[in-house]
Image (tube, helix red, strand yellow):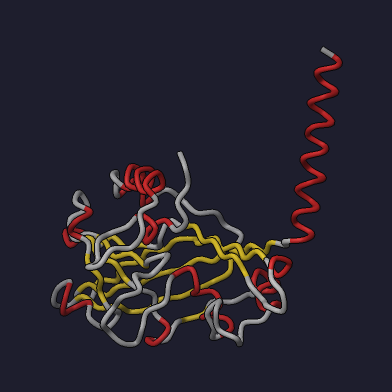
Amino acid sequence: MRGLARIVFFGAVGAAVLYGAYLLVFPQYTHRFRITITVDDNGKPRVGSGVVTVTYQNVDALLVNQKSWNVSARGPAPWVDLGQKGIIAAAIYSYTPVNYEPMPYSAADLSFVAYYGAKHHDPKLSKANIENISREAGLRKLRLDQMPEFIWIPDVANPNSAELVPADKFSEIIGPGIQLSSVTVEITDAGSDNSLYQKLPWLSGMERDQYRRLVVSSIPFKLNATYLVGDLHPF
């Protein structure tokens, strides 16, 4: 037993050393931020939020004379309960082929949009920005041209009811008197919750299934688990 315990111990130490060396070569920077959405429902404020975790990993060592990052994001998406009108959520990853302007952002980009006015592929976004974003403080209110992509699910029992809603078209698409009031972003240490999974009982099964099948975006729009949870995780 002592011999086995030694093997396990030194194996664990070796794995920790290798992982530490890996992070030295490919450093990671993780931050969390809370997105809060306020919707005016015929004079009644409806508020919902969610915490998004984003990790940037520097992969310069794999390239020659280039700067590159692997980016991963995880939600669940911030969302607002609209009562009988379903829910509205800010997509963690946006559905790219949209035909409206301004082009919406992925929720995964909103911390850099809010604090630095940039997205991760914007040349204005520096390594220092990525390293320091977790230390930023204060609430930031987004402008109309900085809004995330919104997904409306009018029938929470039916994922096929989902459709895209531009930030300035809430009343036109969702119903009269429904307007987006504000979207704010704030760096936080808080973790995410499972309220969206509880509201959408089919979401975990969709995530599991799409992780196995490596589902990607489809045209025309059809709800994909990555829009609501970010990078898919095995269960």
Q: Is residue 110 left or right of residue 59?
A: left
Q: Is residue 3 above or below residue 11?
A: above
Looking at the image, which residue is at 38% across and 70% down?
94
Q: How far across and down, in percent of the image, does residue 206 sit? A: 32, 47
Q: Viewer-proximal residue, 111 or 12?
A: 12
Looking at the image, which residue is at 36% across and 83% down?
103
Query: Count of labels shown?
Result: 0
Q: Is residue 43 above or below residue 82?
A: below
Residue 39 falls in which quadrant of the image? Answer: bottom left
Looking at the image, which residue is at 58% across and 84% down?
116
Q: Viewer-proximal residue, 44 or 24?
A: 24
Position of the C terminus by quadrant: top left
Q: Viewer-proximal residue, 89 or 160?
A: 160
Q: Viewer-proximal residue, 88 or 120?
A: 120
Q: How far across and down, in percent of the image, does residue 123 sit? A: 60, 86
Residue 55 falls in which quadrant of the image? Answer: bottom right
Looking at this view, name the residue that lies furthest to the left: 176
Q: Is residue 161 above or below residue 100?
A: above
Looking at this view, name the residue that lies furthest to the top: 1
Q: Is residue 101 left or right of residue 148?
A: left
Position of the N terminus by quadrant: top right
Q: How far across and down, in percent of the image, does residue 173 sit? A: 16, 75
Q: How far across and down, in percent of the image, does residue 213 sit? A: 36, 47
Looking at the image, which residue is at 29% across and 44% down?
201
